[in-house]
Image (spheres, coloured by chain):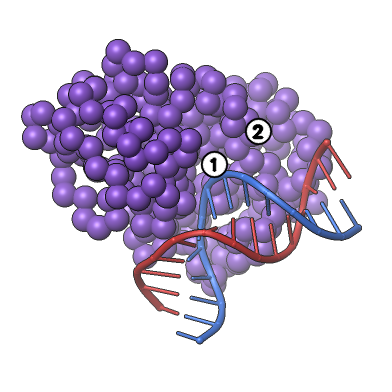
Chain colours: A purple, B blue, C red
Amino acid sequence: VRGGLIVPELPDVAVLGTTLERACDRRIVDCTITTAKILSGTSKKGLRDLLIGKRLHGVVRRGKHVVVGLKGRERHLVFHFGMTGSLVVDEEPGSHARLSCRFEDGGTLHYRSQRMLGKIATCKDPESWWRAHGLGPDALDVDWEMFRDRLRGHRGMIKAALMDQSLIAGLGNVYSDEVCYQARIDPGMRVDRLSDKTLNTLYRNMQRILHLAIKRQARVSDLPDTWLLPHRQEGAADPRGHGGTVVKRSIAGRNAYLVPERQQQV
DNA sequence: ACCTATGTTATCGC
DNA sequence: GGCGATAACATAGG
């Protein structure tokens, strides 16, 4: 969220999934991969051979991963975006395009990644990929009972648990802070110190925040100004105007932003 | 030149 | 074994 740079979390990846749908059902006639560094478990030639002549079909998202099928093939394509990845369809990609496909209708699909911390992989089917990588259920597919049960017994901090992709997939550093802020819970609280009532508040805020962020296409400028997200800087005034100040604190090895005056600690 | 931002993984130590 | 802390990865921008 710094300097207009978006680090993809669940809402951003949901938008990228929609972008990828625009690339579906169109025959791929050419494919260029600029660096093998972004590939996992496949090679430039292997991926190129897999894609040329085929059509993408059936986009599935789970947390920050997107999987898409290949029509008439047993293989699926997995996209992960790391901190700087994105997809561009039928537009000029600018710099840092790592995978580029051209369709027979003249359109294009580009996977961009400046820092190359994301990965493109292949898998037999989405389920086997989730299982092999220990990915928890998507945050938007989790109901309240599941949320409570999956967090139960954890002794770490709530922020760390919310970011743990094996518990619940989709929240990163930014949205875990947002959920804690709007639920008015200190992100450093231990999970096992939270009552069911408090956990339920976190759950309901998480659902509401993610749904609204997707509705607004995950664009920071279109999110409510009462959210913490557009105010992630030390010393900023509490966006809900209760006289508090945004503070930066290291929690579970990450930079957490919070308003201590408004977020309950026990 | 140095520091920082982010997601994920690996590793160390309590 | 859970958990926190730290470094590694890569790179641009302050």
**Considering the numbered disc 1 on the image, is that residue within a helix, a strand or a loop?**
loop
Residue shown at the point (78%, 38%) measured from the top left: A154
Kind of residue at disc 2: Leu
Residue C9, compared with residue A224, is above or below; it is: below
Instruction: Identify the residue shown where x is 36% and y is 33%.
Output: A46
Left or right: where does residue A54 sit relative to residue A238?
A: left
Closer to the camera in the image, A70 or A156? A70
Q: Quadrant of residue A22?
A: top left
Q: Tally the marks.
A: 2
Task: Evaluate whether residue A10 shows in this view.
Answer: no
**SS class, disc 2:** loop
What residue sits right under mark 2 in the picture? Answer: A167
Looking at the image, residue A251 sits to the left or right of residue A1; the answer is right
Mark 2 chain: A
Q: Residue A236, relative to residue A29: is it above or below?
A: below
User: Callout 1: few (<14), some (14-19), or many (20+) C-alpha neighbours within 10 Å?
Assistant: many
From mark 2 to mark 1, how far is it between C-alphas? Answer: 10 Å
Q: Nearer the viewer, residue A223 or A43?
A: A43
The residue positioned farthest toward the front in the image shown? A45
Q: Mark 1, chain letter?
A: A
**Which residue carries the number 1 mark?**
A171
Above or below, A261 against A89 in this view is below
- Image location (x, y in percent) of residue A54: 24, 22
Q: Position of residue A195 (x, y in %)?
A: 77, 35
Residue lying at the far top in this picture: please name it. Answer: A72
Packing grade of label 2 (10 A; few <14, some 14-19, many >=20) is some
In the figure, A67 relative to A190: above or below? Answer: above
Q: Position of residue A74 (x, y in %)?
A: 39, 15
